Amino acid sequence: MGVIKLTDTPRAKIMIRAANWVGDAIMTTPVIRAVRKNFPKAVITVLAKPWVIPVYENNPYIDKIFVYDSNIRHKKGVGTLTLVRELKACRFDLAILMQNAFEAGLISFLAGIKERVGYNTDARGFLLNRSIKLNPALKKGHLIDYYIGILKGVCLADDGRDLDLFLSESDRVFADRFLELKRFDLSRPVIGINPGATGGTAKRWFPERYADICKKLTQKFKVKVLIFGGPADVKLGDYIAGLSEGCCVNIAGTTTLGQAFALIKKCSLFITNDSGLMHAAAALDINQVAVIGSTDHIATCASNQNSVMVRVPVPCSPCLKDECPKDHECMDKISVDMVMETCESLLKNSRQQS
């Protein structure tokens, strides 16, 4: 497969179809940076669902964001035709599909985009004139490398594996003011926990143990702990805050995603399940403890060096299920003491390096 050359227009137009989940979207950012490196004069547009837009909106390698409103304007059916018509009007020269669905290939084909790049997954190979056969080795590796493999499949240079997440000034100001308002002592560690996870309870360490770790951290370091999460995690956050006897501030569902990113950036330590916010902390290079059970610890582990995975191998893990059909052994074997020991080690190393 030959190298893609976009020399027939003064400023080539590239569309990148974003992944649909926050963590996956963050893990595609090395691809976006590499596309800019390969095509420095191109106009790069990201086609993204509304909930992942904060991942991209401050990224200097992106020129435009096209909102894929699949709930209303671009709802399946007539809305799909509306999306195709709008994309066709943009006259894109190249589509790079991070999303692996048949729909992504169909939309780029119907929009008349000349060069259409993506894996030949979901029986869509005939819709892509740059259809990439998936290397079996990539199925067993990290998702970052899986996404970079799309570029390599069409002979484009990559730009390393580092994740990008850029914060707006308004979100940075919000984080500073929030911590001041809640009277956080910034001479001590700012600690956050993320007890939720999308897709069911199988990925979640037990809320009672999150409460216990918060109490131990408060006693040891004389701090308050921020509880992160989305609107679906409000009750979970309230429950943990109640069990932890006043040492937590529950911000689940009260911030925008961008504001949550800015508050994670202020953290000295982040404790989390496998989640989108885990990858946000990795992109922001925050010390973190990732509690991993049912998910693929190779494909989706946090990629920053100052992240430590706490995992106890059991025969049925990774099961990749939303709910545990048995006894949740993969999480039950992870004790509060194991997590606490890891937290203390990370904070100690952080102090020694500062």
Image (cartoon, grey):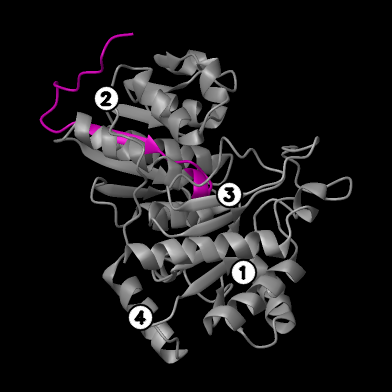
* Left or right: residue 227 compared with residue 349: right
Task: Rate crowding at label 4 as few (under 14), some (14 to 19) or many (20 or more) other CA atoms within 10 Å.
Answer: some
Marks 2 and 3, how far apart at CA: 30 Å
Q: Mark 2 or mark 3: name the one nearer the start of the chain.
A: 2
Secondary structure character of the magenta stretch overall: loop
Task: Give residue 12's quadrant in the image.
Answer: top left
Task: Rate crowding at label 2 as few (under 14), some (14 to 19) or many (20 or more) other CA atoms within 10 Å.
Answer: some
Question: Which secondary structure lies at badge 1?
Answer: helix
Name the one closer to the observer, 325 or 107: 325
The amino acid sitting under disc 4 is Asp
Question: Which secondary structure lies at badge 4?
Answer: helix
* Chain part drawn in magenta: 1-24
Task: Give residue 151's quadrant in the image.
Answer: top left
Number of the label disc, if any, that sits on residue 309: 3
Task: Indicate the position of residue 141 as horizontal and vertical percent values.
Answer: 53, 28
Which residue is farthest top? 1
Q: Which residue bears the numbered disc 1?
A: 231
Of circles 2 and 3, which is in front? 3
Tell whether label 2 touches label 4 (CB within 8 Å).
Answer: no
Q: Mark 4 or mark 3: name the one nearer the start of the chain.
A: 4
Question: Image point 44% across, 42% down: which residue?
Answer: 27
Task: Indicate the position of residue 204 as horizontal and vertical percent values.
Answer: 71, 57
Marks 1 and 4, how far apart at CA: 22 Å
Q: Which residue bears the numbered disc 2?
A: 157
Marks 1 and 2, how far apart at CA: 39 Å
Task: Indicate the position of residue 69 as horizontal and vertical percent values.
Answer: 49, 51
Q: Which residue bears the numbered disc 4?
A: 176
Q: Is residue 249 visible?
A: no
